[in-house]
Amino acid sequence: MKLFLSENPETESDISGGKEHNPLVKIDGLSAAVNGELLLKDVSFEIEKGDLVGLVGKNGVGKTTLIQAFIEGAHRRIYGGKIEIAGKRFPAKNIKESAKLVAYVPQRPNIPKQMLVADYVMLGRTAYQGYLAQSSALDLRITGEVTEQLNLTDFAAHTMGELSGGELQRVVIARALAQKTPFLILDEPTTSLDIYYQLTVLSLLKQLCLLQGVTVLCSLHDINLAAKYCDQLVILGQKSLLACGRPSSVITKENIQRAFSVDADLHFVNGELVVMPQLTGDGSYATDVALEEL
C-alpha cells in the first residue's frame, strides 16, 4: 500500500517491502461533505492487487463514508477526489459497468427470506444479463463454482430464511463473488457473528485473496482480528487518514491512542500481535471498570 497524503505530516505510511508494486485500487484526495459538514478529508492511498485490507477506527470517523464512495448512486454527489479500479475511473459510465468493477457486501443486507440460495447468488450476475434477466450457461457455471467454493452446494435449494448467521454471510459473499469483479468491499462482515464464524469469514476472505487474487477492503471493529488476517491496515482518525501499512508497522501504542482514545499494551503470542486496550490514564481495563460498576 502506498500513501499519497501530503497535507498531514503526522500521517504514517508504509510500503510493503519485497513485493512488486501492483496497485489495483487508487484513491486520490477523497473527500466528502454534506451541507458544509466535512465527513471525510483528503484521503489518498493505494491497495495492492490480492491484498486483504482492513479499515479501522472509532465510530463516526468516516469508515462508512469511505466505503460508500465505492457504491454507485445519487449519494456520490457529496464526494470529491478520484478513484480508479483496475485502471478505470470509478464510478463508470453507467451502473452496470460500475458493478463489473466492485462488489459490495453491506453490514445489514436486505435478505429475502423466501428466496432460494441459488437464486440469491444468481443476483450477482445481474450486471451481465439482458433486459429479461435470463441466466446464461456462463451465469449458471459461475454461480455453481462460487457456491461450491464456499461450501454452499448443499444449501442451494434451501430458502434464505432457513440459514444461520454464518451461513447467510457466506451466501451474501457468494453473491458478491458471482459479480466477478476485481475488487470486493465488505462493511463490518463479522458484526453479529460469534467467534467461530468471525474466524471462518475472515479465513475465507484471506483464502480468496491468496488463491484467487481477489482484492478486498473490509471495515472491522476488532483490531486483533484485523492484525491477524489483514495484509494492510487503513487507520482513520478524525475523518482523515491517520496511518496505513502492514499491521506490525502501524499498530503502535501511539496510533491506538490517537485512533481510539485508549491506551494499549502490545504483545506477541505465538508470533501474532495482540493488542490489550485499556482506558486512558487510570490503567484499568475497560472490562474491569464495567464489572466494578455493577
Image (spheres, grey):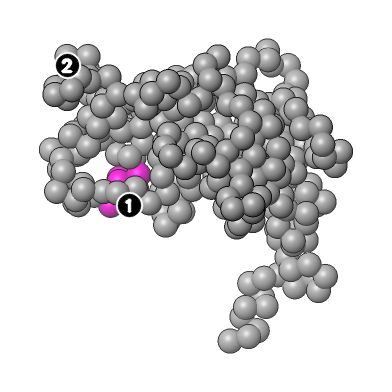
Choose top left, top right, bottom left or bottom right for residue 84: top right
SS at circle 2: loop
Tell me which amino acid carries mark 1: Gly
Q: Is residue 147 left or right of residue 85?
A: left
234 above or below 161? above
Mark 2 and mark 1 lie on one chain; the one further toward the N terminus is: 2
Q: Are marks 2 and 1 in contact (CB under 8 Å)?
A: no
Q: Would you say 5 lies left or right of 34 here? A: right
**Quarter holding the C terminus?**
bottom right
Task: State which quadrant residue 103 falls in.
Answer: top left
| Region rendered in magenta | 164-169
Q: Which residue is mark 1?
A: 165
Observer able to see residue 218 = no
User: Magenta segment: does it hold 2?
Assistant: no
Q: Residues within 10 Å of mark 1 (few under 14, many from 20)?
A: some
Seen in the picture, residue 176 relative to 142 is either above or below; the reply is below
Relative to 117, residue 211 above or below: above
Is residue 83 visible in the rendered image? The answer is yes
Under mark 2, the amino acid is Ser
Density class for disc 2 (Cα within 10 Å; few <14, some 14-19, many ≥20) is few
Distance from Cα at disc 2 to Cα at disc 1:
30 Å
Q: Position of residue 198 (x, y in %)?
A: 46, 48
Q: Which numbered marker is on residue 124?
A: none
Residue carrying label 2: 136
